[in-house]
Amino acid sequence: MDDEKKWYVIQTRPLFEKKVFRQIEDKKIEVFLPEIETIRIWSDRKKRIHKPLFSGYLFVNANPDERIQAITNTVGALRYVMYQKRPAIVTQREIDSIKISLNLAERVNVENTTFQKGDEVMITSGPLSGLKGIVTEARGHYKLLVNIIELSASLSIELFADEISHMKKINEYK
């Protein structure tokens, strides 16, 4: 059996990421909960808070025994994220990229809205506002290449996800 440590993804109950993080940390197992600082606004005040970058998920660097130990008797830990019927493994390079992105927190925003290749969208802000396009490539969670329909020539531009809105999803039933 392979005793090498690998990064695994644990799904948690909603709003339990920090509690699960502390419990796994108390077990002396390496755990990573990427957080970003954001401003929460109430009717009477503003407050800077740290919230998980990936709501409901955290990462564990563990060998097979530690992987089982990390989730066993951990209140709020639901399951490991699976890929092809095996626990999904995240590479060290991907973890390092997430850590680097945390230094650029003002540019990072994980959206619940996802754009897929083929989605019809409208640009909602910037100098090309009002133009319609088709997503030709999605790059991560915040950059898209959109092919503009109205121009006689094909023009691909990079846009942030918050600069466009869905007109028609390629797979509307999802």
Image: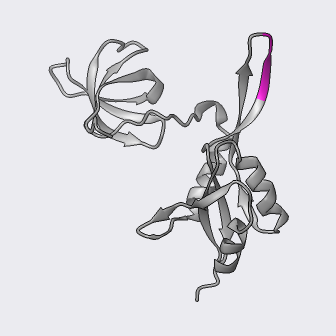
Left or right placement of residue 10 versus residue 123 in this view: right
Residue at x 55% of width, y 37% of height: 110
> Residue 165 lies in what quarter of the image?
top left
| Spot occupied by residue 140 in the image (x, y as percentages of width and height) | 46, 43
Give above or below for 119 relative to 129: below
Left or right placement of residue 93 versus residue 39 in this view: left
- Span shown in magenta: 44-48
| Spot occupied by residue 149 in the image (x, y as percentages of width and height) | 20, 22
| Spot occupied by residue 127 in the image (x, y as percentages of width and height) | 39, 12
Residue in front for this viewpoint, 43 or 49: 43
Q: Magenta includes 67?
A: no
Residue in front for this viewpoint, 133 or 79: 79
Residue in front for this viewpoint, 49 or 140: 49
Residue at x 67% of width, y 57% of height: 77
Residue in front for this viewpoint, 62 or 147: 62
Magenta span main SS: strand
Give above or below for 70 relative to 148: below
Left or right placement of residue 126 versus residue 43 in this view: left
User: Which residue is at the far right?
Assistant: 26
| Spot occupied by residue 23 in the image (x, y as percentages of width and height) | 80, 59
